[in-house]
Image (cartoon, rainbow, N blue to C red):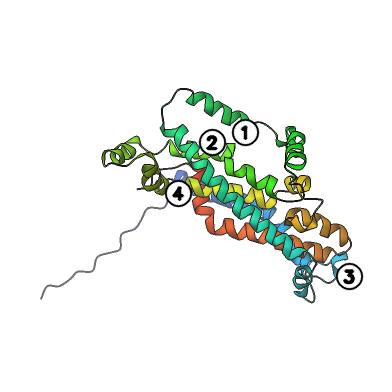
Amino acid sequence: MTRVLDRPLERTAPPSPAEHTARRRALLEWIALHSLGVAVALFFALPFVFVVLTSLMSDSQALSRDLIPHPWEWDNYHRVLDTPGFLTWWKNTLLYAGLGTALTVISSIPVAYALAKFRFRGRNLALMLVISMMMLPPQVIVIPMYLFWAKQLDLSGTLWPLLIPMAFGDAFSVFLLRQFLTTIPDEYLDAARVDGCGDLRTLLKVVLPMARPGIAAVALFQFFYAWNDYFGPQIYASENPGAWTLSYGLESFKGAHHTDWNLTMAATVLVMAPVILVFFFAQKAFVEGVTLTGVKG
C-alpha cells in the first residue's frame, strides 16, 4: 500500500496594494451605478405608487397627509365603474385604439415594403415626403380637416374622422417599418422570387415573419398614441358624450369629482392599467423592434 504523505497547504500571497485599490474601485463603481439605477427607478415609480395608494383611501383621508390607506377602500374602483358613461368610454377607447392600430399597421406595411425593397423613379422623393409629413404638426391642419369631416361629410360627434385616416397609413409607422425592412437581406427575397413567389406572396410569406419585431413596435406605438389621445376626441367627439374616449372622459370625470381625489385617482389607475400591462408583456418585442436589431430566420 502506497503511503500518502501529507503536504503542507500552499500559502497564497496577499493582494498587492494595486490589486486592493482596483477591487475597491470596482466595488465603489458598482455601488454608485446601482444606487443611481435605484434612484431613477424610484423617481419614475413613486408617482404611480402615490396614485394607487390615494385611489384606495376614503374621501376624507385623501385630503389629509396620510400616505397609507386605513382602511383600504377597494370599493372606490366599483364606484368609478358605476359612473354613467365610464364603460362606454372604455368601449370607445378599445374601438379607437384596437381598430386604429390594425388599420395603421395594415396600410403602412405595403408602403414601407415598397420604399425599402423596390427600385423605382422618385423613391427618394417619396421618402422625403414621408419624413416631411412627420415634421408637420397636426394642429396646423386641424381647421381644414375639421371643416372637411364635419361640414362636408357630417361626421362630427363620432370617432370616424380619427379612424378613417388611419386606413391610409401613418408617416411615422411607414418610416419606422421602412428602417426595419432595410435590415432584411435582399438574398431572402431573391430566393423567394426564384422559387416562384410574386411580390405579394414574398411580402406575406418571407418579409412579414422576419419583420415581426418591427411590426410589434409600430403596433404598440400606435396603440399607446390612440389610447392616450386627447386632442383628437376633443375636436371631433366632444359634442357627443356617447363617443367620448377614456382620455377625454377622464377630464369630465375629474371636473365632476374635483374634491374626491380618491375617485379621481381610481379612475386614473383604470385608464393607465391596460397600457402598462400591454407594455409589460410586449416590452421585449417593443425594444427589439425599436432598436432594429438582427434578422429573424
Mark 1: amino acid: Met
Residue 212 — which label?
4
Between 250 and 84, the one lying in front of the other is 84
Instruction: Say whether marks 3 and 1 touch (CB < 8 Å).
Output: no
Identify the residue at horizontal 73%, vertical 45% (top origin): 232
Mark 4: amino acid: Arg
- As drawn, 283 above or below 115: below
The picture places residue 194, in percent across and down from the top left corner, at 26, 38
Viewer-side label of 3, 2: 2
Residue 60 — which label?
3
Q: Which residue is mark 2?
A: 175
Q: Secondary structure at mark 3?
A: loop
Q: Is residue 62 left or right of residue 162?
A: right
Q: Earlier in the sequence, mark 3 or mark 4?
A: 3
Q: Earlier in the sequence, mark 4 or mark 1?
A: 1
Mark 2: amino acid: Phe
Instruction: Say whether marks 2 and 1 touch (CB < 8 Å).
Output: yes
Q: CA distance from mark 3 to mark 2?
A: 51 Å
Viewer-side label of 3, 1: 1
Quadrant where the N terminus lies? bottom left
Q: Which residue is mark 1?
A: 134
Identify the residue at horizontal 54%, vertical 50% (top origin): 30
Q: Residue at the left extreme?
A: 1
Q: CA distance from mark 3 to mark 4?
A: 50 Å
Q: CA distance from mark 2 to mark 4?
A: 15 Å
Mark 3: amino acid: Ser
